[in-house]
């Protein structure tokens, strides 16, 4: 499994010691503000098992994020193939951090490491990121990562109840832009 390092962070395998802070993050209504609901400890634990299984099987996925200077677990970031029920295909970048880690540039730093890995080690032609239309903080991270938004890619997530969380925006970043500009994207029919 790949372990990624930045100046301040390490993206690594999940540890048993991550389970309680991960469950606390997923029970925090502010951390889960742009999701339909908070998660139970059982659902959080199940997600850790899935994330680690993907890392073990593929060598990449949703890594646990740790602050190098303190050893503190602060959340996750990484890459994952788009779900089958999404209106697009490709590999998605994502992140979720504990509130105590907000405002330090960690999301951008960790996500940039994941994007670099995706482009350089996996030779991905493009990486995308998705969030609700109301999640302006994540959209700001996406822009800092050099991702661009085309409103034609936006969609309503039918798995989310009607309301402000249903509308989603898609940001994309190509591995390399040729003279023609943005690469063609693959969308599901």
Image (spheres, rainbow, N blue to C red):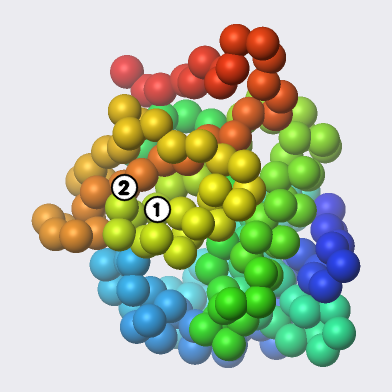
From the viewer's perspective, tell me whether residue 7 is left or right of residue 158: right
Q: Please, is residue 90 above or below residue 136 in the view?
A: above
Instruction: Pick out the residue farthest to the left.
Output: 162
Which quadrant, please, contains the N terminus?
bottom right
Closer to us: 81 or 152: 152
Residue toward you, 185 or 48: 185
Q: Quadrant of the C terminus?
A: top left
| Category of crowding for the residue at label 1, using alpha-carbon neighbours closer than 10 angstroms: few (below 14), some (14–19), many (at least 20) | many
Secondary structure beneath label 2: strand
In this picture, residue 24 sits left or right of residue 155: right
**Residue displayed at 71% across by 52% down:** 112
Quick check: can you spot residue 88? yes
Numbered tag placed on residue 82 in the rendering: none
Instruction: State the SS at label 1.
Output: strand
Could you tell me how far apart the alpha carbons at marks 2 and 1 are, in whole angstroms? Answer: 5 Å
The residue furthest top is 180
Q: Which residue is mark 1?
A: 131
Residue 24 placement (x, y as % from top left): 49, 88
Could you say which is closer to the camera, residue 112 or residue 120? 112
Residue 31 placement: quadrant: bottom left
- The image quarter in which residue 101 lies: bottom right
Q: Position of residue 178 (x, y in %)?
A: 68, 14
Marks 2 and 1 close (CB-CB < 8 Å): yes
For the point 86% across and 85% down, which residue is it? 69
Q: Which residue is pictured at 52% across the width and 15% down the height?
A: 184
Tell me where residue 136 appears, x and y as whole percent. 39, 60
Image point 51% across, 37% down: which residue?
148
Q: What percent of the width, then of the height, locates residue 173?
A: 59, 34
Q: Is residue 40 visible?
A: no
- The residue singled out by tag 2 in the image is 168
Q: Earlier in the sequence, mark 2 or mark 1?
A: 1
């Amino acid at each position: 499994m790949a372990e990624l390092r930045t100046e301040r962070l390490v993206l690594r395998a999940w540890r048993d010691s991550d389970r309680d802070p991960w469950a606390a993050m997923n029970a925090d209504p502010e951390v889960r503000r742009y999701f339909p609901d908070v998660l139970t400890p059982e659902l959080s634990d199940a997600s850790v098992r899935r994330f680690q299984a993907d890392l073990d099987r593929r060598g990449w996925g949703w890594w646990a994020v740790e602050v190098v200077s303190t050893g503190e677990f602060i959340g996750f970031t990484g890459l994952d193939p788009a779900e089958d029920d999404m209106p697009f295909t490709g590999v998605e970048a994502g992140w979720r951090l504990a509130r105590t880690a907000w405002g330090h540039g960690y999301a951008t730093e960790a996500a940039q490491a994941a994007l670099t890995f995706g482009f350089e080690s996996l030779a991905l032609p493009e990486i995308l990121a998705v969030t609700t239309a109301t999640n302006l903080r994540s959209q700001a991270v996406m822009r800092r990562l050099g991702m661009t938004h085309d409103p034609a890619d936006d969609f309503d997530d039918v798995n989310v109840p009607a309301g402000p969380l249903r509308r989603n925006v898609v940001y994309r970043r190509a591995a390399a832009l040729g003279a023609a500009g943005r690469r063609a994207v693959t969308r599901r029919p």
